[in-house]
Amino acid sequence: MAERSVLSIRDLAVQFRSEQGTVRALDGVSFDLRAGRTLGIVGESGCGKSVTARSILRLIDWPGRITGGQILLDPEEPQPTDLTALGPESRRMREVRGGRVGLIFQEPMTALSAHYTVGNQIIEAVLQHRDLSKADAKAQAIALLGEVGIPHPQRRIDAYPFELSGGLRQRVGIAMALAGDPDILIADEPTTALDVTTQAQILGLLQRLQREKGIALMLITHDMGVIAEMADEVAVMYLGRIVETAPVARLFAAPRHPYTRALLRAVPSILATPRQRLSTIGGAVPHPGLRPGGCSFHPRCAENLGERCRREVPAPVPLNEDGGASCFLAEDAA
Amino acid sequence: MLIYLLRRLGLAITTCVFISILTFIIIRLPPGDFVDAYIANLAASGSSVSMEQAEAMRRDYGLDQPLPVQYLRWMGRVLEGDFGVSMVWRRPVTEVIGDRLWLTMLVSLAALFLTWAIALPIGIYSAVRQYSIADYIFTTLGFIGLAVPNFLLALILMYVGFRYLGLNVGGLFSAEYVQAPWSLARAWDLAKHLPLPAAVLALAGTAQLIRIMRANLLDELRKPYVVTARAKGLPEARAILKYPVRAALNPFASSIAYLFPYLVSGSIIVSLVLGLPTVGPLLLQALVAQDMFLAGAIVLLLGVMTVAGTLVSDLLLMWIDPRIRLEGQ
């Protein structure tokens, strides 16, 4: 394990309390983000991908709250910071937001305010984390816009977001996330709203920035193609748990969890014969408040072992470089 | 931006023309005319008017002409600033209305600013702390505010102000200043009298605007750009005030236009109760007496001022929202 870990999440649990009952949005999630590496997080809608990202920044919407586990910043330093112990509004936490951890959004239109110029919104982020004069901050913002590949940054800095194309807006979003010079980037479905060509450009940009700055990238997506392109390691989530982790090559070559296998089968293939139906995963994701007992995937699992999967919860994935699956089949195979 | 301005201006002028026609039609709608009402009045007090006298009066006032002619003659004079002679008061309409128009605007504007000053912070608080105890309290108070007729509130406040606070309530001036010419002392006297009617008139509008602000801000607070602002490391108050509150401000700008006529028409009863020298009570008298020129002038002026208010709020919206400002570029 060459690269240093910059963020360690251990047994993170997040619950949303409502009158209908408690929803365990995250239930014992553990992983590491490493400098210069990309962790891809995949799963269906509602599996807890975005809640994980929000938890790291301590920006979970009410009534959600962290009920257990740790989020350790600089876990290999003598004095790591546990973000779960900080107040969400504390000065220390606000320094982490944008200063250590940058956030890139899915929808570049709604993620930027239409009421201010992009310059205004980026300069604000620069000034929040660096002690610069207004003129220096503006120069810095122009430099950032140039760095993310926006042509004519001196002019574009005075544009409003609605005057830019989707691809340019997403570049602005990335520039804004970089404004505080963070060493961790969380990209929450950064290319879902973009067309395929733009998508490739944005992914290329993220790769280049990561290489240049040694950034630890957490890439949330439901697109297996993006994972194959970008990720070094992959974590597959289902109903608030990580069900499999693996280096990206092994995940595609030899997936160990039945859910991962089903996800991969559902990817449309160019080799498919005409009119061949797409493979789908039977059933729907259960409401998180009605989590099935035992292994939560068992009602939809094509390979379930019956009684055992209904009653027992498989062990969480091991935290080693090779990863593993939280499944009795994988345990038995080992 | 220029196109937007010109279009708004053109619309405003067209609207004013239609308002003048409507005004004319409405004041001519009730059966009979001023002379009939005048005769009925005299009959009630025991004297009578002959047919010839009535016909002569009709000719004098131009009431024997066809309606379009009457309208055009009236409008022609209005454009020259001559609103005609009040039939009841037997004085020029401009003289009868006099200060009342400005006092009406002053009371309405005071009520409007009071509405904003109260509704904005409470609306923001209620949205940011949704379902908190304070939010429930404000919501309850808001519904009470919407439900209480404001003349009743005026009576209660007058009683409380007079009985317990020893305030000089009612009217906009103390007795010694009512007829006095304008001076600093008179203005100060007006300033002292203004809060009570402004508060009474602001009540229902405030309650309404709190609800609108709360609902709008709740929508905006859920949008991703709020998370973006927080994720930059901005302090919570700054993140909320700069982004979602700004986006939720549109109804405040629009409220100028629709609150103004609401304040004026809603103020008639309150003005009677509080004895305010505004145009509301005057309008009521003029309508009862079918004093066509006076009523027409007041309705027309109120209509035009409402259109002007709409124009102002359009300009404000343009200032708040760059999407409108940059339209068509």
Image: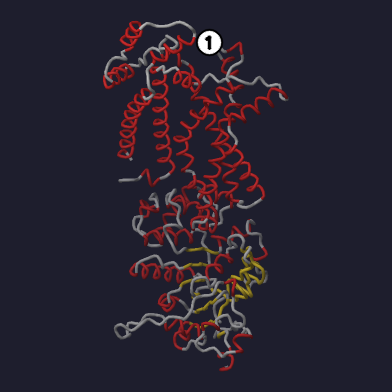
Residue placed most toward the observer, A261 or A225: A261
> Dot 1 lies on which element?
loop
Q: Residues within 10 Å of mark 1 (few under 14, many from 20)?
A: few
State which quarter of the image contains the N terminus of chain B. Answer: top left
> x%, y% of residue A179?
49, 58
**Is B38 on the left or on the right of B212, as rendered?**
left
Residue placed most toward the observer, B321 or B127: B127
Q: Residue at x 48, y 56 (%)?
A: B225
| Above or below: residue B150 compared with residue A221 | above
| Above or below: residue B227 compared with residue B304 | below
Q: Residue at x 27, y 16 (%)?
A: B65
**Quarter assignment of residue B36:** top left
**Quarter assignment of residue A323:** bottom right
**Is A266 on the left or on the right of A292, as rendered?**
left
> x%, y% of residue B242?
52, 47
Q: Is residue A217 visible?
A: no
**Quarter assignment of residue A199:** bottom left
Residue highlighted by disc 1 = B181
Q: Residue at x 44, y 60 (%)?
A: A173
What amino acid is found at the position of numbered circle 1 in the picture?
Pro
Q: How is the image coloured?
A: secondary structure
Q: Is residue A16 visible?
A: yes
Residue lying furthest right: B164
**Is A235 on the left or on the right of A156, as rendered?**
right
Residue placed most toward the observer, B66 or B77: B66
- Chain letter belonging to callout 1: B
Q: Residue at x 55, y 50 (%)?
A: B240
> x%, y% of residue B151?
59, 29
> x%, y% of residue A10?
63, 75
